Amino acid sequence: MATIASNIQQVHQRISRACALSQRPVRSVTLLVVTKTFGPDAVREAFAAGECRFGENYVQEGIDKIAALAELRADVEWHLIGPLQSNKTRVVAEQFDWVHSVDRLKIAQRLSEQRPAQLAPLQLCLQVNISGEASKSGLAPDEVAEVARQVAALPGVRLRGLMAIPEPAGDLEGQRAPHRALRELLEQLKAEGLALDTLSMGMSADLDAAVAEGATMVRVGSAIFGSRAVSDR
Ligand SMILES: *Cc1c(COP(=O)(O)O)cnc(C)c1O
């Protein structure tokens, strides 16, 4: 039976292979372990295997897990990767290290105001609806530049880059196209003078395509912990 530690090792092998194929240094890709729906013991197992960045989708579940794993708090980063409503920003500003799912200026403004002064700025990515799906959250690609400029000027947060959850595609080229579009959008923002370094893209099913297109952070859950009991997509 596969253990969490051996699954993590296999994910790192996939990342290494994808980096080698596109001649990228393996250190240019960071693994974010997505722990949503899995309990504190699963997180401890991933931590024992050497992982220290964990992603949660739901604010309350994340807050509860951060509290249950208080003994790890100084040694790990907690990333919010799921939808964030404005009435939940305060606990997120107080408890998390990163938010990948910022999809409007108002959320970033609230996070900036509510980030405690003694903490480092909250690290942010703007979520982009890169496949143009009506049901998906995220900024439309043509809205991103304006919001990025405004978010980059806020004091309590630091804009790091872009995040997307592309529509699933079966073949490699179909998977690569939306990831390529997100990379091109990031490159445009950098060319306009924004200091950005993060492309949060790639999940269990498509991380190879995402790395081939320049992902710097892949968000992987089911390839590590097995399938979740309840689908949330
Ligand atoms: C659940 C989730 C992931 C991880 O998905 P897997 O297919 O389990 O690897 C990554 N990103 C987001 C935003 C998610 O909600």
Image: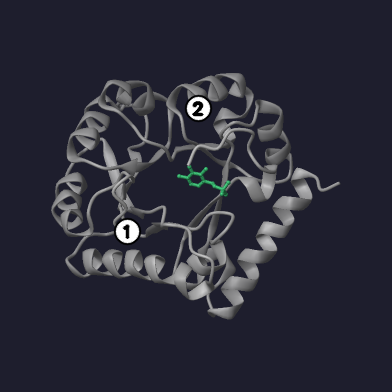
Q: Residue at x 60, y 45 (%)?
A: 221
Mark 1 residue element: loop
Whether residue 215 is visible, yes or no, is: yes
Disc 2 vs disc 1: Cβ atoms closer than 8 Å?
no
Residue shown at 64% from the left, 68% from the top: 16
Relative to 155, is 205 on the left or the right?
Answer: right
The residue at which mark 1 appears reads as 130
Residue 200 percent across, percent down from the top left: 43, 55
Using the rendered image of the protein, determine whether residue 116 is visible from the camera's viewpoint.
no
The circle drawn on residue 62 is 2
Percent position (x, y) of residue 178?
38, 66
* Res. 93 image quadrant: top left
Across and down, in percent, residue 136 comes to 33, 46
Q: Residues within 10 Å of mark 2 (few under 14, many from 20)?
A: many
Q: Quadrant of residue 115?
A: top left
Q: Amino acid at mark 1?
A: Ile
